[in-house]
């Protein structure tokens, strides 16, 4: 059977994208990787946030470059910070905008409202970035949702009660865990979205364990940013990425976990 959000919805017996009153989303990120004309400078990218009253202050973004030198007598390493763009945080501290020489990122921090509000602001700011930076090629589209599911702390953590995608332990080992970290990479659909899935645990308080479900769904392709239909393509693909993210989330959690969000 070919995987799709629809097959997940059919298997679970309810439509995807349901609204949870206490959604566990710590951060949602909307990301577009691009190639810019060589003439575009870092200083030009400051214009992306200019005039945006809700994003009052810019901070520089840097890339790290490490230059290595070898000769028979000496080895040297020179680490440099290279300016690549700017970052703005909204006045309420809930939104983060990043404009750089290699792409655009918009994030919403907890509490997350809904896709309609999140995507509307993301596309509005993307249009501004595109007008200023004039990207030639779009190479990667991604949605990343970092969920933290807080559960009561016990002497040992029983993952089976909360997660359907988990580590399988040898039957010769104890079947309970103090902590864990796992990463999964896969293609969700041929010539379509791919998935990076990270699962781990944190300790938000002495009485709780936070199960982190970090879902990064992305689409790698070479799209002509000047194509007349590019905005329709982006909205269509981000819509599929959103459906895929919802399907992955629902496929990874149990009915007991869903009760925590009500």
Image (tube, grey):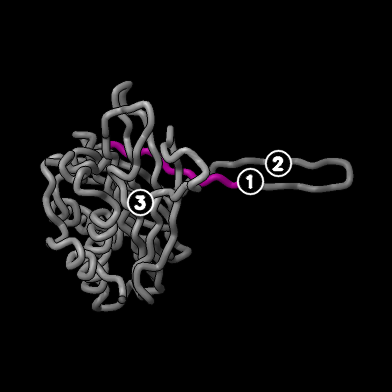
Instruction: Give the mark nearer the N terminus: 3 vs 1.
Output: 1
- Which quadrant of the figure contains the N terminus? bottom left
Badge 3, how many Cα within 10 Å: few under 14, some, many 20+?
many
x, y percentage for residue 200?
Answer: 40, 41
Label 3 with label 2: CB-CB less than 8 Å: no
Q: CA distance from mark 3 to mark 2?
A: 29 Å
Seen as rendered, the residue at the extreme front is: 172
* Res 48 seen here: no
**Which residues make up the magenta segment?**
57-65
Looking at the picture, does residue 104 appear above or below residue 262? Answer: below
Callout 2–callout 1 Cβ contact below 8 Å: yes
Is the stretch drawn in magenta largely helix, strand or loop? strand
Q: Secondary structure at mark 2?
A: strand
62 falls in the magenta region = yes
Helix, strand, or loop for circle 1? Answer: strand
How packed mark 2 is, by other alpha carbons closer than 10 Å (few <14, some 14-19, many 20 or more), is few
**Residue 77 visible to the viewer:** yes
Q: Which residue position holds label 3?
A: 99
Residue placed under numbered mark 2 in the picture = 77
Between the residue at mark 2 and the residue at mark 1, the CA separation in whole angstroms equals 7 Å
How many numbered marks appear? 3
Residue 82 or residue 241, whichever sits in front: 241
Residue that numbered label 1 is attached to: 66
Instruction: Please tell me in which quadrant of the rendered image residue 153 appears.
Output: top left
């Amino acid at each position: 059977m070919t995987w799709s959000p629809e097959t997940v919805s059919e298997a679970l017996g309810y439509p995807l994208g349901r609204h949870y009153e206490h959604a566990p989303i710590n951060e949602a990120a909307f990301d577009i990787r691009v190639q810019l004309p060589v003439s575009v400078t870092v200083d030009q990218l400051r214009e992306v946030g200019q005039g945006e009253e809700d994003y009052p202050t810019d901070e520089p973004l840097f890339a790290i470059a490490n230059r290595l030198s070898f000769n028979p007598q000496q080895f040297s390493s020179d680490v440099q910070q290279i300016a690549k763009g700017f970052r703005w945080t909204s006045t309420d501290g809930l939104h983060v905008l990043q404009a750089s020489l290699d792409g655009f990122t918009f994030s919403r921090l907890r509490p997350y409202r809904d896709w309609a509000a999140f995507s509307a602001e993301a596309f509005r700011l993307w249009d501004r970035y595109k007008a200023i930076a004039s990207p030639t090629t779009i190479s990667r589209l991604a949605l990343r949702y970092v969920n933290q599911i807080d559960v009561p702390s016990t002497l040992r953590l029983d993952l089976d009660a909360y997660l359907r995608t988990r580590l399988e332990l040898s039957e010769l080992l104890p079947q309970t865990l103090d902590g864990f970290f796992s990463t999964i990479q896969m293609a969700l659909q041929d010539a379509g979205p791919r998935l990076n899935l990270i699962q781990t645990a944190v300790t938000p308080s002495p009485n709780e364990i936070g199960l982190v479900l970090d879902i990064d769904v992305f689409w790698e392709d070479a799209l002509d940013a000047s194509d007349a239909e590019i905005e329709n393509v982006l909205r269509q693909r981000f819509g599929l990425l959103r459906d895929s993210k919802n399907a992955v989330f629902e496929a990874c959690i149990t009915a007991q976990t869903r009760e925590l969000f009500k």
